[in-house]
Image: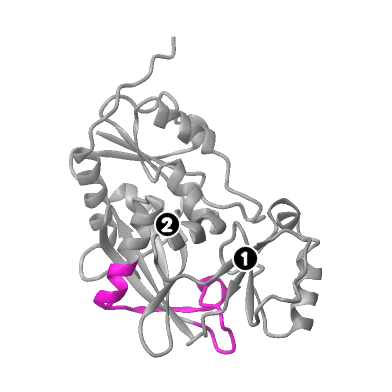
Amino acid sequence: MRIALVAHHESETNLRLVEAAPLGVQAEIVRPSRIRGWLGPGDAALARIDVLRSLDGMETGSWEVGLIENEGIRVLNPLSALMATHDKLQTARLLEAAGLPHPRTIHFEGTGDVGTIELPVVLKPRFGSWGSDVMLCTTRRQLTEALAVISERPWFRTHGVLMQELIPPLGHDLRIVISAGQVVGAVRRQAAEGEWRTNVALGAERQHADPPRAAIELALAAAAAVGADLVGVDLLPIVGDGWAVIELNGAVEFNDEYSLGADVFAATMKSLVDAIRSRPQTAIASLA
């Protein structure tokens, strides 16, 4: 069996996943433009297309992933799952439909009265990552000034902005990595001093985590709600008790710090290969 990690980058995570392929499986990072013709009957793909650094959409490759799906190739993290995890508006709608705890979300496209928006509120790009352009507004003045700033962003002109209810920050969150319906890794992310966001790109520190059962069950339900095979689920603790899903990442990056006792990359690849082998392959459409 051959597995193509469909991605634009040879990141540490992608390289380690390829190296961890079990015996009898050939894994390789393949750019989307090269994927057609690289896979045949019995092979599979893992789509690892990320959001653009410009935050105005996904990286190129959606068309190619859709094509190989239509040709009958087994695809993990199919196009529907990538869109459901990278498009935060779609994420919010799917989590709400599944009855899972998630901040109330409003899509604001630049028109309409924001005077009735309940504060505090968090502004987020619809396609975002790394904590970029995420702003906390606790007053009307902050909200007005923040909207004036982001109104100049190309991503805002394309997709508008999401306004989300603030889950009172406790200075840390929990990221759980789900692979084929199994928990394979997790870390606690401690925010940098003076920072309310828990993104490592903003200075947060990764710490060992032993996820409680309630968090595990919520992460598994969130991954199932968006149909993702390999996904990072970010959970925020709720004051008092419980958790809320804050984001999902369909191109989640992780390292050895995520280990729950076993090699996190070997555990991930084993679960994915087992999932591929358990799924029937559809007939490949004729291209003649």
For the residue marked with disc 2, what is the amino acid?
Answer: Glu
In the picture, measured across the screen, residue 163 lies left or right of residue 169, that is: right
Q: How many marks?
A: 2
Identify the secondary structure beneath mark 1: strand
Q: Position of residue 257 (x, y in %)?
A: 34, 71
Question: Is 222 situated left or right of 133 in this image?
Answer: left
Magenta segment: does it hold 208? yes
Q: Residue at x 29, y 31 (%)?
A: 43
Q: Quick one: label 2, few (<14), some, or many (20+) residues within 10 Å?
A: few
Indicate which disc residue 106 carries: 1
Q: Earlier in the sequence, mark 2 or mark 1?
A: 2
Residue range highlighted in magenta: 191-218
**Percent position of residue 185, x then y:** 30, 66
Q: Which mark is residue 203?
A: none
Q: Nearer the viewer, residue 260 or 163?
A: 163
> Which of the two residues, 198 or 116, is positioned nearer the viewer here?
116
Residue beneath label 2, please? 12
Label 2 sits on a secondary structure element that is helix
- Mark 2–mark 1 Cα distance, whole angstroms, equals 35 Å
- Residue at image x 70%, y 55%? 155
* Quarter in which the N terminus is drawn: top left
* Residue at (33% x, 55% y) in the render: 224
Q: Is residue 171 left or right of residue 152?
A: left
Whether pointer 2 and pointer 1 mark residues with C-beta atoms closer than 8 Å, the reply is: no
To which quarter of the image does residue 197 belong? bottom right
Q: Residue at x 59, y 60 (%)?
A: 128
Does 22 sit left or right of 141 as displayed? left
Q: Amino acid at mark 1?
A: Ile
Find residue 187 and report its horizontal and vertical position in percent.
Answer: 36, 74
Which quarter shows the C terminus?
Answer: top left
